[in-house]
Each structure stands twice: as structure tokens, then as C-alpha cells.
Amino acid sequence: MRRHDDKGSEPDERPTGATTGTPGLAVELRGVRRRYGRGTGAVNALTDVNLALPRGTFTAIMGPSGSGKSTFLQCAAGLDRPTAGSVHLGGTEITGMSENELTELRRSRLGFVFQAFNLLPSLTVEQNVLLPMRLAGARQDRHRAAAMLAQVGLADKARRRPAELSGGQQQRVAVARALVTSPDVIFADEPTGALDTGTAAEILALLRQGVDALGATVVMVTHDPAAAAWADRALFLADGTFAGGVEHGTATQIAARMAALGTPTARAGVSVGAAA
Ligand code: ADP
């Protein structure tokens, strides 16, 4: 995930006092805005983002380059702070949290899968999967790690190092690591961007299985309609706000909707789907 170097725009409308999230929702964004910079050079990367994702769902976030996908993911995952609005994860408001609280939250209650796998090369596969527990100061549950490695088909690779595995296998480890703490939400940022089509489908099947069999909640940013078709819904960002979605769409349907979003008239006419 890309980090934004943005020293000139401290949040100026941060809410004071935590509000309560809606029961049953894993992710809830209300009136989220993110502005970079100030004055005439300011960029409104997110203009008005409202989103309500129930637990146990798989959502793809799509949109053209510059539509705000990275900014959305960073604000939703507590890696960046919105200029205004609130973010609840697993019912807890994260918007007013300190840096330490956010770090703790990311370690204990969120999972991440990145395009570049992001495994630690000096650790074994098993140690990589145990890492979230270790960082959170929790007991390192080796049975749980073994179960997650079995879940992603890598039971026999626990003692290997990442460099000994293929790209697809490394991403399987990353999925196991994301699932191991039963997080409130797994954020996936172009998780298949570095993989060939067949391997990508295997990874998407594992995320799907995580949702269906383990009750995980997955929010995946992708530009690929074929990847988005594995999700329950694809939601489209356009100019910093959600502009409709497709429920249980095929890759072709999602691609057509994406193409239509490019035209201003189509953009004005879309309904907002699952985005509250
Ligand atoms: P996407 O991921 O969909 O390509 P981004 O969230 O990266 O979109 O960017 C949304 C908008 O915010 C774009 O106009 C981009 O140029 C702008 N932007 C992103 N990061 C910064 C930053 N650090 N400073 C200024 N503008 C930024």
C-alpha cells in the first residue's frame, strides 16, 4: 500500500468523543472526507464517503486511477486520518485514536494482504504467520498457525523461508497471516496484482473461503473486474465518493459498469448500491 507523504494537512475537524457503530457492521464510514494540502493547492481525495459493510462479507472497491481508492483504504484501515467524518471498525470508532492505539488496533484486529506479499524474509513461513500474535504481545498459537497454513494448502511449507516459495505460495502465506488472528476486517490492496491469472484465482478463492468458511470480512481494492467478481459486491469510487455498485456481478458486468462510470452522465445517474 502506498504511503502518502503529507505533512501539510493535519486533520482539522477530527471528532471528539467516540460514537457507537451500528451492530453487525464490520466497517462503517460516515461522511468521510480527506483533503490533502491547503488553500488553492488543496486536493479533495475523498469528498463524502459513506459505507456500511456487514460482517462476513467480501467487498471489492474499484475506480479509475485518482478516484481515491488508496486514500479510502488508508482511512478505512487506520493508516491515515480523515479530514472529517468517522470510521468504525468492528463497532469501535477509530477516528479519534492515538497513533499507539491505531498501531495496536491494526496488529490485533485487522489483517492486511498487499500486492507485494510483504513477508519477512528472515523468518520461516510459520514465524511469518505467527507474527501478528507476536507483535500484539499475544500467545503465539502454533496450532492456530498450522491450521491456517493447512487452510491455504501450505501445511508442508511451515519451515521454509519466503524466498523458497513461488509468488503465489508467498501470497498464500500472507492470507494465512491475515486470517490467523480472526480479525474484524482484512484489507487487501491489489492482492493479485503481481500474480498470473491462474495463481490470482487461487488467492481469490482463498479469500472467498475465508469469508464463507471462517466468517472473515474482506475489503479488497482492485482494478481487475475478474478479481472483483469473486466478491459479493463491487463498489465504485469516482472523484472521491462512492458512485454505485454491482451485486454478485460477473467480470463482464463489472467491467461494463466501470466503463460506464467514466462518462459524466452515467456517473450522475448511478444508484449507490450497498454504500449507505
Ligand atoms: P487511487 O488510489 O484511486 O489512484 P488516490 O487515493 O491515490 O487514488 O488519490 C486520490 C487523489 O488524491 C488524486 O487526485 C491524487 O493525486 C491525490 N493525492 C493522493 N495522495 C496525495 C498527497 N499525498 N498529496 C496530494 N494529493 C494526493
Image (cartoon, grey):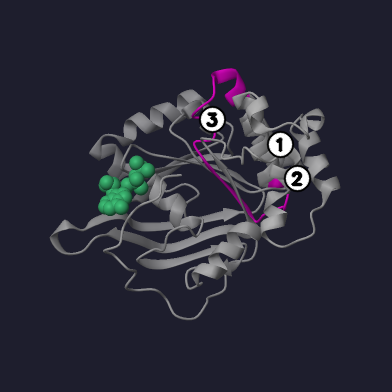
Few, some or many C-alpha atoms within 10 Å of disc 1 (few <14, some 14-19, many ≥20)? Answer: some
Looking at the image, residue 202 lies above or below residue 158: above
Q: Nearer the viewer, residue 1 or 47?
A: 1
Q: Disc 1 or 3, which lies upstream in sequence?
A: 3
Q: Nearer the viewer, residue 6 or 215?
A: 6
Few, some or many C-alpha atoms within 10 Å of disc 2 (few <14, some 14-19, many ≥20)? Answer: few
Residue 214 is situated, as x and y percent measured from the top left of the image, at 75, 45
Q: Secondary structure at mark 3?
A: loop
Q: Amino acid at mark 1?
A: Gln
Q: Amino acid at mark 3?
A: Thr
What is the C-alpha distance between the residues marked 2 and 3? 21 Å
Are dots 1 and 2 in contact, CB under 8 Å?
Answer: yes
For the point 72% across and 38% down, the residue is 124
Residue 6: quadrant of the picture: bottom left
Q: Which residue is mark 1?
A: 209
Mark in front: 2 vs 3: 3
Residue 198 is situated, as x and y percent measured from the top left of the image, at 60, 18
Residue located farthest toward the front when viewing the structure as drawn? 122
For the point 86% across and 46% down, the residue is 143
Apparent side of residue 190 relative to residue 128 in the rendered image (left or right): left
Few, some or many C-alpha atoms within 10 Å of disc 3 (few <14, some 14-19, many ≥20)? Answer: many
Q: Disc 2 or 3, which lies upstream in sequence?
A: 3
Q: Specify the segment rendered in magenta.
A: 179-201
Whether 76 is among the magenta residues is: no
Q: Which residue is mark 3?
A: 192
Is residue 218 among what the camera can see? yes
For the point 63% across and 28% down, the residue is 163
Q: Which residue is mark 2?
A: 214
Q: Nearer the viewer, residue 83 or 248?
A: 83
